[in-house]
Amino acid sequence: MMQLVLSEFQDQLMRGLAHRMNNILSLFHGYLGLLMDDQKLNPVMKEGLTRVSDGAREASDLMERINSITRPASSLPREMAPADLFRQLAPTLDRLQTPRVKLGVECPEGLPAVCVDISRMKLAVVELVRNACEAAHSKVTVRVSAEPGAEQPELFPSGGSISNGERVKIEIIDDGPGIRPSDATRIFEPFFSTKKKNHAAGLGLAVALGCAQEFGGALRHRSSKAGTTFDLTLPARAQRQLKAVA
C-alpha cells in the first residue's frame, strides 16, 4: 500500500520552494517576452529564446505540480454532485483529446454527492486522464458510478484504503499496453516515470494519490496487456466526516 505522508516541515519547505521558484521564473517570462518582441532579433537568437521560454514554462508547471502534492495551506471541502464536477471539467478534458486518442465520459445524474475541495478534485481527475491519454492506443473512457463499500480484491498494490459504506468510484480506463509488473509497485512514487519524453515529470499519479487520500479516498489500479484501469474512490456524503485541514 502506498501512502503519501509529509511532515509539516516538508509541507512548508515544498510550498516555500514552489513560491520562490515561481517568483524567479516570472522574471524569466517577463524579460524573455520583452526580448522576443524585438523586431530586429535574428532567427537564430529568436529560436534560442523560444527554447528558453518553453523551458521556463515547463519549470513553472513542474513547480505547480510539486506544490500540489503537499497538503494545501487552506482547503475548502464542500459537497458536490459528481455530474456537476464533470460538467465543470468538460472543457479541460476536451483539450486532453488528440487526433490519436478518443476520450469518452460517462457520468449519470443522481449519484451521491462527495465532499471535496473542488479545485483539488479537478486536479486529481485531470492528472489521471492525462496519464491515460498518454498511454492509450486509441481510446480512454472515464466512467463514474456509485457502489456499496465491500472491499474488492487487489490485483496490484494500491494507493490507500477506504472504509465501508457507499462510495463514488471514478474509473479511468485506457487501451494502452498496460503497466509492467516490475513497475506496479513504483508508479505512485514522485518523479518515477516510464515515459520516454524528456519533459515527463513523473508526478501525475503522485498528485492524484495525494488528492484522493486528502478526502478520505483511495486510488487503485489493475492492468494487463489490454490496458489499465485506475479507480479513484471517495466516500459518499453520508459516510464522509470532514477533518480540519491544518
Image (spheres, rainbow, N blue to C red):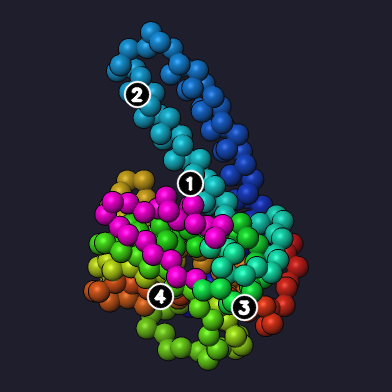
Assign a secondary structure to mark 2.
helix
Q: Amino acid at mark 2?
A: Gly
* Mark pair 4, 2: CA separation: 42 Å
Q: Residue at x 39, y 64 (%)?
A: 104
* Sequence order check, earlier mark of 4 and 3: 3
Assign a secondary structure to mark 4.
strand
Work out whether residue 67 or residue 40 is closer to the camera in this orientation and state it. Answer: 40
- Highlighted range, magenta: 87-107
Q: Amino acid at mark 4?
A: His
Residue 202, label in figure: none
Assign a secondary structure to mark 3.
loop
Q: Amino acid at mark 3?
A: Pro
Assign a secondary structure to mark 1.
helix
Vertical side of 37 occupied by 218: above or below = below
Vertical side of 94 occupied by 54: above or below = above
- Relative placement, left or right, of 133 versus 168 is left
* Mark pair 2, 3: CA separation: 52 Å
Pointer 1 and pointer 3: residues touching (CB < 8 Å)? no
Residue 112, label in figure: 3
Q: Quadrant of residue 215?
A: bottom right
How packed mark 4 is, by other alpha carbons closer than 10 Å (few <14, some 14-19, many 20 or more), is: many
Q: Residue at x 53, y 91 (%)?
A: 150
Pointer 1 and pointer 4: residues touching (CB < 8 Å)? no
Numbered disc in front, either 2 or 3: 3
Q: Quadrant of residue 83?
A: bottom right
- Relative placement, left or right, of 125 versus 41 is right
Name the residue tied to disc 2: 48
* Mark pair 4, 3: CA separation: 23 Å
Work out whether residue 224 or residue 195 is closer to the camera in this orientation and state it. Answer: 224
Name the residue tied to disc 4: 221
